[in-house]
């Protein structure tokens, strides 16, 4: 029987979400690409990938990055990131499908601190867990399963040696490593934090439209926009309609020259023109919303 496991590569869970007031009722439609990969674990991981020495890569950076050119340092990061994403599947096979390891990992996770107390861990494969962290990953719980995810904060000490684009990218990804934005059905950070990420992502895709990281950050931006203006909040929480509209208008006033403000403004106009009812016109607008985001970006670039 095939098993497909969600791997939180960019964002899924907030390690500190339990300490914050979180937004529920967010229902991201199927066409929205969450920065989460789905790995088919019926196919074995390539042996070459499994033997990749990520620990050695970090040691190499420690010893050599100060002598690298900006181009060399940037390319080294991208190569390590690519290897990290690939080898992540190997570590999923090791810990995510082992019921005993999973049970013991969940026992030593403190949701209030958003961290593991590995002194309490008694699930075996302890050396593998040490290796996971030393290789640039961290463990995060998502819907009852603990997954290894790339910890971009570990690239921060090297970022100043890299290109401006790579630095911006690492900054964005580190935010997700530290506090994952949400799942397909809920926002796990505050709206203020979400607004910050929207603006950072928009700035990145506008500034580096021909860059190597553009496609990934674009997908992040699309998901952020869906988290920010999901129709379910307007239509399912009637008592919050005025509050939601006020927040949207405040965003537009605070950031009038952004693509995001134009998207939100058009969204509000569509709702207003249709009496804030979820009629066919609004449904059609939302149906095309995901693909239309790129149209807004293209217009802004021309």
Image (cartoon, grey):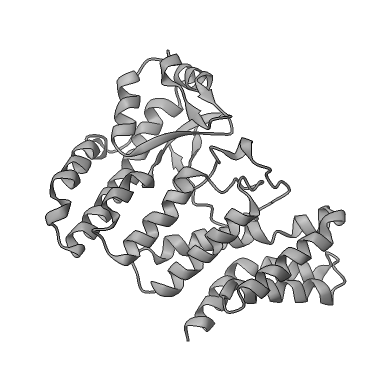
Q: Position of residue 8 (x, y in %)?
A: 48, 42
Is residue 85 visible in the rendered structure shown here?
yes
Front residue of this view, candidates 159 and 277: 159
Furthest toward the top, the residue is: 122
Front residue of this view, candidates 139 and 172: 172
Residue placed at 74% from the left, 60% from the top?
231
Residue placed at 34% from the left, 34% from the top?
90
Q: Position of residue 205 (x, y in %)?
A: 45, 70
Residue placed at 15% from the left, 62% from the top?
69
Q: Position of residue 10 (x, y in %)?
A: 46, 48
Is residue 31 visible in the rendered structure shown here?
no
Q: Is residue 213 above or below residue 16?
A: below
Quadrant hosting residue 139: top left
Q: How many marks?
A: 0
Quadrant hosting residue 129: top left
Q: Is residue 4 above or below residue 231?
A: above
Residue placed at 37% from the left, 15% from the top?
124
Q: Position of residue 100 (x, y in %)?
A: 47, 16
Q: Is residue 120 above or below residue 42?
A: above
Asked if residue 49 lies left or right of residue 179, the reply is left
Front residue of this view, candidates 28 and 251: 251
Front residue of this view, candidates 243 and 238: 243
Furthest toward the front, the residue is: 254
């Amino acid at each position: 029987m095939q098993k497909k496991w969600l791997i939180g590569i960019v964002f899924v869970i907030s390690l500190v979400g339990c300490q914050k007031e979180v937004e529920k009722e967010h229902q991201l439609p199927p066409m929205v690409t969450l920065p989460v990969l789905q790995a088919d674990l019926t196919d074995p991981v390539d042996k070459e990938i499994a033997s990749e020495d990520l620990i050695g890569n970090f040691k190499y950076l420690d010893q050599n990055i100060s002598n690298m050119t900006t181009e060399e340092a940037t390319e080294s990061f991208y190569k390590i990131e690519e290897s990290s994403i690939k080898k992540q599947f190997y570590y999923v096979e090791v810990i995510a499908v082992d019921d005993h390891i999973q049970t013991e990992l969940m026992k030593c996770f403190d949701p209030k601190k958003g961290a593991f107390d590995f002194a309490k861990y008694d699930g075996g494969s302890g050396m593998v867990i040490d290796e996971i962290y030393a290789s640039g990953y961290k463990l995060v719980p998502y819907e009852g399963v603990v997954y290894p995810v790339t910890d971009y904060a570990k690239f921060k000490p090297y970022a100043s040696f890299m290109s401006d684009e790579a630095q911006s990218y690492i900054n964005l990804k580190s935010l997700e490593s530290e506090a994952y934005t949400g799942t397909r059905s809920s926002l796990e950070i505050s709206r203020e934090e979400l607004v910050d990420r929207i603006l950072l992502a928009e700035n990145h895709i506008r500034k580096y439209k021909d860059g190597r990281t553009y496609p990934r950050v674009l997908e992040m931006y699309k998901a952020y926009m869906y988290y920010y203006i999901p129709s379910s909040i307007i239509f399912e929480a009637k008592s919050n309609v005025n509050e939601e509209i006020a927040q949207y208008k405040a965003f537009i006033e605070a950031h009038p020259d952004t693509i995001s403000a134009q998207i939100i403004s058009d969204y509000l106009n569509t709702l207003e023109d249709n009496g804030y009812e979820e009629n066919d016109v609004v449904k059609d607008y939302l149906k095309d919303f995901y693909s239309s985001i790129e149209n807004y970006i293209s217009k802004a670039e021309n």
